[in-house]
Image (cartoon, rainbow, N blue to C red):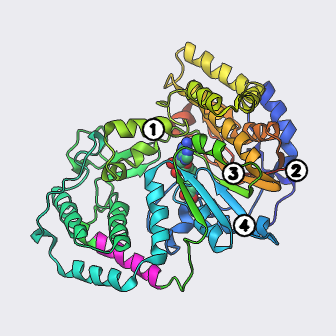
Amino acid sequence: MQVVATAEKSESVRSRKSKETELLFRKYYDKLTVNQELSRALVSNQANKTIPFYRWLKYKEAFSSALVRFFTTKFGFGKNNPRILDPFAGAGTTLTTATKEGWHAIGIELLPVGIAAMKARLKADKVNIRVFEKYLSSLEKVSLESLESSYRFPHLRITEKAFPSKTERAISAYMSFLNGINERDVRYLFWFACLSILEDVSFTRKDGQYLRWDSRSGRTLKSNFDKGRVHDFRTAIIHKLHMMLEDIRNRNGGSYSRNVKIVSGSCLDKLPNLPSNSFDLVLTSPPYCNRYDYTRTYALELAFLGFDEEAVRNLRQALLSATVENKCKREQLLAEYRVRGKENFYSMAVNAFYNQRALHEILRTLYRARKRGELNNNNIPNMVENYFFELNVAIHELARLINPGGHLVMVNDNVRYHGEDIPVDLILSDFAVSAGLKVESIWVLPRGKGNSSQQMGAYGRNELRKCIYIWGKPE
Ligand SMILES: C[S@@+](CC[C@H](N)C(=O)[O-])C[C@H]1O[C@@H](n2cnc3c(N)ncnc32)[C@H](O)[C@@H]1O
């Protein structure tokens, strides 16, 4: 991978900054390198769309398995039983790619949708192909309309009217078909196939912060959005199951389930329990500070998983703060660190947070703008503050967990609010330094991200950096 010289950095890397941000920029200027080989496809889930197993669920937040392979090769070379951790494991790209490369992998994830995708990939290792084929062929012969079922799709308020009524009946009949599958792993994979097509057979589309609704849904809507084809359930499920079968048949004895451990829960809660100096590499991509609410975009899947309104609210609050609805977790974190007897560690992290001057300069600007009524949502400053507070605690834990000589690689985007560029890459790198890590590089994708159309009018076009940070723990 060729990294271009610092001097060739595009002008887009530079942008309007206030005093402390400028100082921070200067501090890490020589670490910022535009890496021409980092295409969006490599860093986003785009590349996974055609990759066996990874193509089963459209998990937009995922990075590609090619990216994971790049880093496991770079940092695993010559290591015996290398160990990798992903504290925001998503659909588990890091875990299953790394284990195929001989790594022991642990992933922590809170959203059950990602966990379901990981489990499906792991179960595919063991599943009996003949039994899978048998049930697929009987599904193809059966008329779903003929199956009696007491199952009703357990809608949340925000998923009501998501499916045409014919589809709702077909899902119900399919659930009754699943009850007849005796083999547990096959039943799970057939269930997962249904979870993974919910968006395709619905009037919704996952769209960043929201679930967008097609006007055919019969909901009262402001816009006249047409998502295009709404797939027929039967065709979609059979197509998905064939895709899964094809991947399972072609796995060639390759295994995903060896040496993978999935921990379900919040990494803020789970990281403190892991032993120090126990991983050679942490490779991760946390939620971005972009107001995207996973509990909204994945509402259909959460409903299908049996989440009621309260469970969804609790899940939203437990996720890393990245939406305007997240409440502050500081009191709760402090109490938990007290119980663990790790108050000193926590104070160290909190000090690093308060000493990050550029962040506090930005926060002051945002709070002032709020006071003047200039923000389109008054919770934006709190969201930004909580985001950095929580991620800083996580970074301190991760720095503790890495072996001397090991690395932490993080994929994240910069953001902008009220025309104020927030250099997430530099602020988090500075936290990493406070936690005892060394910033080796901040790789910048050749094409950043434009600002939102809302902000474009007021502040003009200015690209935000999309980056991969590489931090090392000194020997
Ligand atoms: C950008 S995605 C990571 C995607 C992952 N790299 C992949 O390839 O699938 C961020 C993930 O962090 C998860 N997450 C958010 N808050 C969390 C928390 N407190 N603990 C663990 N996971 C969390 C989200 O559910 C989401 O799946």
Q: Dot 3: within a 10 Å radius of its alpha carbon, few (fewer than 14), some, or many (20 or more) residues?
A: many
User: Mark 3 or mark 4, which is nearer the start of the sequence?
Assistant: 4
The kind of residue on which mark 4 rests is Thr
Mark 1 falls on what kind of element?
Answer: helix
- In the depicted view, which residue is nearer to us: 443 or 128? 128
| Residue annotated with mark 2 | 474
Find the distance from the CA under tag 1 to the CA under tag 2: 36 Å
Report whether 184 appears left or right of 426.
left
Find the distance from the CA under tag 2 to the CA under tag 4: 19 Å
Mark 3 vs mark 2: give the one in front: 2
Mark 2 vs mark 4: give the one in front: 2
Mark 2 falls on what kind of element?
Answer: loop
User: Mark 2 or mark 3, which is nearer the start of the sequence?
Assistant: 3
User: Mark 2 or mark 1, which is nearer the start of the sequence?
Assistant: 1
Name the magenta segment's main secondary structure. Answer: helix
353 versus 295 height, above or below: above
For this orientation, the residue located farthest to the top is 371
Q: Is residue 418 visible?
A: no
Whether tag 2 and tag 4 are in contact, CB under 8 A, the answer is no
Find the distance from the CA under tag 1 to the CA under tag 4: 32 Å
Report whether the residue tagged 2 is closer than 8 Å to ligand 1: no
Give the residues drawn in magenta, as a range.
236-249
Using the rendered view, name the quadrant where residue 74 is placed.
bottom right
119 versus 436 height, above or below: below
| Residue annotated with mark 4 | 72
